[in-house]
Amino acid sequence: MTGDATIHGGFITLHGRKVVGGAAEGEALVSSERISGWGGIDPRTGTIIETHHPLRGVSFAGKVLVFPGAKGSSGWSNQFHLARLTGSAPAAMLFNEMTTKIALGAVVVRAPAMTGFDLDPLGVIETGDWVKVNADRGIVEVIKREPRPG
Amino acid sequence: MRLTADEQAMRDGRDGEAVALAMDLLVRYGDALGAERLVDTNNVCGTVSASTPFMRDFALQRSGMDAVFSEFNLDSDRAVEIPPVKVYSTHLQLGFDPNQSERMGIAEEVLRFYRKGEGYTAGHGIQLANTCTPYQVGNVPTRGEHCAWMESSAVIYCNSVLGARTNTEGRESTGSAMLTGKIPYWGYHLDENRRGTHLVELDVDIESTFEWGMLGYYIGEIVQERVPVVVARGGRFEKVPNLQRLKHFGAAASSSGGVEMYHLVGVTPEALTVDQAFGTGRPVQTLHYGEAERQQTWARLNSTARDRDVDYVMLGCPHYNIEQIWEACKLLEGRKVHENSALWIFTPRAIKALADQNGYTRIIEDAGAVLMSDSCSAMSRTMPKGTKVAALDSAKHAHYLPAIMGVQSWFGTTADCIDAACTGRWNGALRT
């Protein structure tokens, strides 16, 4: 879905819908799997703890978290709310699937959040890329970590 | 979001600061969802407690429970005075059983703080049901009733079995709904989002609670947050699943995935036929659940378990009802919990009172087990000291407990679990 030229240029722009306004930038942490809140993360450190999760043991604190969406318990928003209060919340959240868990979680994290993208963020953003999120303008700029071989 | 004149007046402060903050949160939340408006609700299930150390400290360092409600139920940095709730509100499960604080290792000052919190909750008009299963203790919404419920296993039961309407709400949205009687009109409040998306054809008969739990776990992992439509082998459920079976089925599907609504063709109220379940839509995928899927699910649910010496057996996730307590008593009668093991059973306080009355609590205690209320091991993060290996009859708990507590866990039938508690050894297996 992305043209080669975009990837070779090492710079990709995505357009999407604002969920929570604001602007932030940071290193991307991309999760191919949905994330569980209560019982899925440790809000004291922002670490994913779910048994079968591919990012188990990895923290999203200060990262631009890119993921399909939320799953699991209704404690999702509360766990991410706690992560904000402990300083372990993501810097921004980009996701594909809108649910009440993630909408409320994003609102109480108070970091910029977006969904409804023209390009699939899971397809074009990789962990380690530098990502600038401007939710008010509906724009995400991705600077690839390193150029890919042709 | 379009607000009515009444909603706008609440937002502008007509009913006080707390209500204005509640309306502000609902508007931010509704905008995030892309909802067009709010809907009236008179049935809210949520939590306002402060039972973790972080929340307790938060309350102690600020203006007590009002500060906790302001931050964690209204998303307000500023603590405001919280008025009594406006609509019928029920409290969900909590961080421990205050009547078993010693056994659960709860310090005296924590218990004192808890009692104050309990008084605050009741004083604000919130019903102290203290359970993840409000529908087992009298909060049974009517078909079509708009609700604002937390607790994924209760949400899926409310939508699917009762035909009432709720999304999976969170602590902040239910707190705001309690004070305003409003919730975003989005998702499962609307007819079109309640239709099936995936067809699940059963190649095996599903009868026991254990089998319903496994089926739910399998389906949730595949359909994630979508709406499965389950068709029995031969098209008709010969044995109609009862409350405990659907409670375990839904709890499992909402843990492995994010299922908030399902249809069982011929059983649940919005699925008299396959056509009704899907409406004008068509299934995006058809799944089969047979012997291979059953074995694969069992292996997945037992993937953390290695050691067969079982330190701890926990039953009651979601909270046991009186039928399950009665069944457990029949399995326990004349037996004793092994000296190297322990058995804790969790139930709502109202059902505990019934168990006391029926003599079940005595049978459980005589066997060396404990009947507890209000909480569970995953919520309270408490287990008998030194627990390394647990045994569970709940797929939901087998999903969460190893992640939260770092223990191994066996998943099996209630009989396998009680046998493990009485022998100290796991002898469970997947039987055909």
Image (spheres, rainbow, N blue to C red):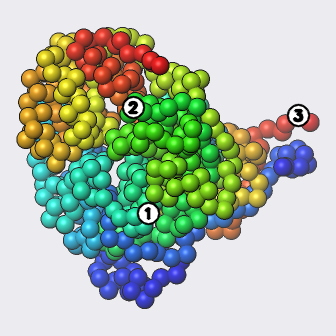
Which amino acid type is shown beneath numbered disc 3?
Pro
Question: Relative to residue A90, is residue B168 drawn left or right?
Answer: left
Q: Which residue is mark 3?
A: A149
Which labelled disc corresponds to residue B208?
2
**Residue most extreme to the bottom:** B5
Does B411 sit above or below residue B219? above
- Chain at numbered mark 1: B
State the SS at label 2.
Answer: loop
Camera-side residue: B128 or B247? B247
Q: Quadrant of residue A38?
A: top left
Whole-percent x, y for residue B179 in the image:
30, 72
Residue B268 image offset from top left, x and y in percent = 46, 52
Residue matched to label 1: B165
Which residue is rendered at x = 35% and y = 28% of the image? B393
- Residue B283 x/y as whole percent: 67, 50
Crowd around label 3: few <14 · some 14–19 · many ≥20 (10 Å): few
